[in-house]
Image (cartoon, rainbow, N blue to C red):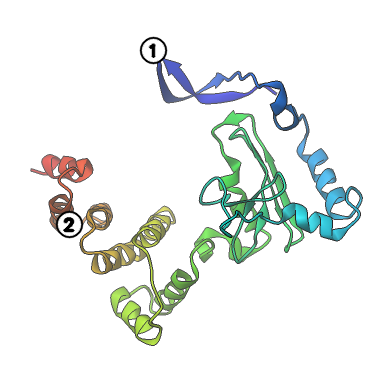
Amino acid sequence: AGSYSTIINTDGKWINDGKLHNAFATFPVFFRTATGIISTSEDLSKWLLALQNGKLLHSKNSVQELFTSAKLNDGHIDGFNKLTNGYALGWPTVEREDHPAATPVGGMRSALFVYPKDDLSIVVLTNLQGSNPEWFIDEIAGYYFPDMKVKNGFGLSKNLKELRQKLIENKFQNAFTIYKKITKNNKDFKLSEDELNSWGYQLLEQNKKNDALQVFQLNTFLFPSSANVYDSYAETLEAMGNRKEAIVNYKKSLELNPNNTNASAYLKDKK
């Protein structure tokens, strides 16, 4: 199948015009064991079954070693990004407490995830460069294991999952009060600004604006010196039609970061 991309080079600049264009790439010979593979999802599934059932590597320990992330000299594990955060014997891996995976990816257009603890593998092949199927394969796995659905809290840290459960029990009301109760009982309980902000946007994507608003507001209480938390909170207030409060929080964000072009553009438009 021909390869496609929505990104083209126009006058020396790479732009995404949203249209499909033929994409051509030439790979050096030493890449061909990776880039030269021609297969189908069915063939790859047969290969994965043979691998895990001992038909290719007879020892179960060998298969386990194949999927085990290597540790660097300082003892930690590292990978490509937040998702594929480890590397095994030729396999990128997803290191996490729930549903770890071995995850070969290719050219931003193909990926397969093996979930060794779940007896599940998922293969997604596309011919669209930039489709990055590795970022949505977990969501497909959620049809087999519902706890892997983002809407069910998958991917959140242990502490954030605890907060989420308490908020659900309280119908997402009084987030800061709930947070204080948790920290009173657990002095080691901590959340980062980024993880709260990311969760807030996840909730927005799920059209849970009121829930997202509570999370963004909590972030302003926990990190009052961050311009970004007020920006996100203001954005959600505006989306919910509360322009007066949105303006207040955009102004606060701009005070903390005068270079916040998003806030300045919003306030200029609302004059």
Q: Is residue 157 above or below residue 169?
A: above
Residue at 43% x, 79% y: name it.
169
Identify the residue at horizontal 29%, vertical 64% (top origin): 219
Give the number of the disc on residue 11: 1
Q: Residue furthest top?
A: 11
Q: Secondary structure at mark 2?
A: helix
The label shown at residue 270 is none
**On the image, which quarter does residue 177 sit in?**
bottom left
Position in image of residue 39 (x %, y %) = 78, 33
Residue that lies at the very extreme toward the left in this rendered image: 271
Q: Residue at x 85, y 59 (%)?
A: 60
Report the mark closest to the observer, 1 or 2: 1
- Measured from the top left, where is residue 56 in percent x and y? 89, 47
What residue is pinned by disc 2?
Answer: 249
Residue positioned 35% across, 62% down in the render: 212
Could you tell whether 240 is left or right of 184 in the image? Answer: left
| Sequence-first tag of 1 and 2 | 1
